[in-house]
Image: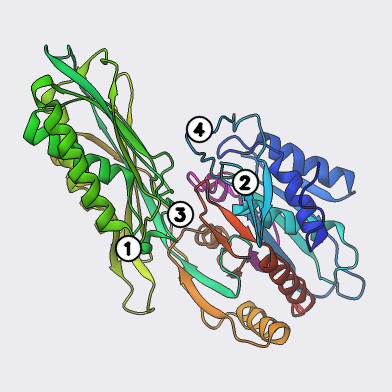
Amino acid sequence: MEVLSNLEPKKVWQYFEQITKVPRPSKKEEKMVEFLMKFAKDNNLEARRDKVGNVVIRKAATKGMENRKTVVLQSHMDMVCEKNRDVKIDFDNEGITPYIDGEWVKAKGTTLGADDGIGCAAEMAILTDDSVEHGPIECLFTIDEETGLTGAFALEAGFFDGEILLNLDSEDEGEMFIGCAGGIDTVADFSYKKEAVPEHHVAYKFIINGLAGGHSGDEINKGLGNSNKIANRFLQKITSKYFARLAHFDGGNKRNAIPREAEFVFTVKADFAEDVRKEFAKFKEDIIKEIKITEPNINLELHEEAMPAFVIDEETQRRLVMAVSACPHGVHAWSPAIKGLVETSTNLASVKFYDDKIQVTTSQRSSLESGKEDINTMVRNVFLLAGAKVESGDGYPGWAPNTDSEILKIVVASYERLFGKTPVVRAIHAGLECGLFLEKYPNLDMVSFGPTLRGVHSPDEKVEIKTVDMWYRHLLDVLKNIPVK
């Protein structure tokens, strides 16, 4: 049963609800590619896909507007697949369950995928609505934006012809984005030895959940709690005071999401059990006091646990705990040029135990290439000093703002005409694909805008209903006013 069909604009919400039924994790977008190609065929639209799975669908100009510049409408087809621990879902084969909660659309216990499914839905609505006035249109749907921008990296020159690109992947209605941060991922691997649990030990599990989480770029400035850092603080306390031994650590998931949950299993000499419980009670009190303003729903638990099969060797434990403690997280530098804009940041995203290694994943961002290099080097050095094997990805470039952009002036004038107020024009600390597009298409004129989303990259993700209508009306008016070639 469709639950969004009565929302406005109808076509956008109808297509969005269809998209929520299509499994589309990053790097596994095959079903979404098939969905888009079938959509194009069913609507007699010209479509092609490239070797990695990017799709472009073309629509001819409205009669009398053939001489307008060609516009590329762009969104990414993949989504971050996060869920609450108590939710069972196979993201590879199951869709999302959306529902209406007052003024917002949410999903039941998972990410909603409005980032950037709502952009895809708007493109599909425009492609099938003959009442929309526009010049030549190319709708570009890219793969794997969330975990490496590989679709944008692999995009070949000549895949589209447009001179103007409207990126539909922003999250604040009334704000027009003309620049973004570049980023790079850094992964540290610790090898370890399995050792027998010491005699006369008891086992416990530490759990932290209820944190807000969210986008590691756009929400890194909010002072939100990092589950890995908090869990590691308690681990360090009980290691140094009571010689606790670590058996397992599982915290965070996606490199571009601030970690919201973590747990670890440890053993400690039975004689220290009561001291550890008291230490936990004091630690819980202190942490809640520290971050109760930004994290009112934080939950900390300590439970007795079945004895683990092994603990890791003390030397690796010491190096891991010290490295996670020393690794920076959060805002590193603010932009001196744009008030309130984060210039450089880093996210300690996940700590995972595997059978042969412990892996720590981090992600660095900066609007300056030199700043990105500096924070990346800082993080690398922490883990190199701790004896880990460290690798960084290729990274992706930022998008330098162009305040003289022709399309920016059109977008701003359109917004003022429709809503009687001037929109905010700014850069964003999150990564967008626009910087990579410029490498292949250096003459593109670009702007990014979208409806209001909150809690993206977390199960709290939601999109504000009224802003989808405002954004879509704005988008249609911009298309109506694209200049001649």
Alpha-carbon distance for marks 1 and 2?
Answer: 31 Å
Name the residue at 32% across, 33% down. Answer: 263
Question: How many neighbours does mark 3 have within 10 angstroms: few (below 14), some (14-19), or many (20 or more)?
Answer: many
Give the extent of the magenta segment: 144-167
Alpha-carbon distance for marks 4 and 2?
Answer: 14 Å
Q: Which mark is residue 344?
A: 1
Q: Amino acid at mark 2?
A: Ala
Task: Tell me if residue 162 is in the magenta stretch.
Answer: yes
Q: Which mark is residue 215?
A: 3
Q: Amino acid at mark 1?
A: Thr
Image position of 459 (left or right of 313): right
SS state under label 2: strand
Q: Amino acid at mark 4?
A: Asp
Q: Quadrant of residue 140?
A: bottom right
Alpha-carbon distance for marks 1 and 4?
Answer: 34 Å
Q: Which mark is residue 86?
A: 4
Query: Relative to 335, does residue 364 appear above or below in the rendering?
Result: above
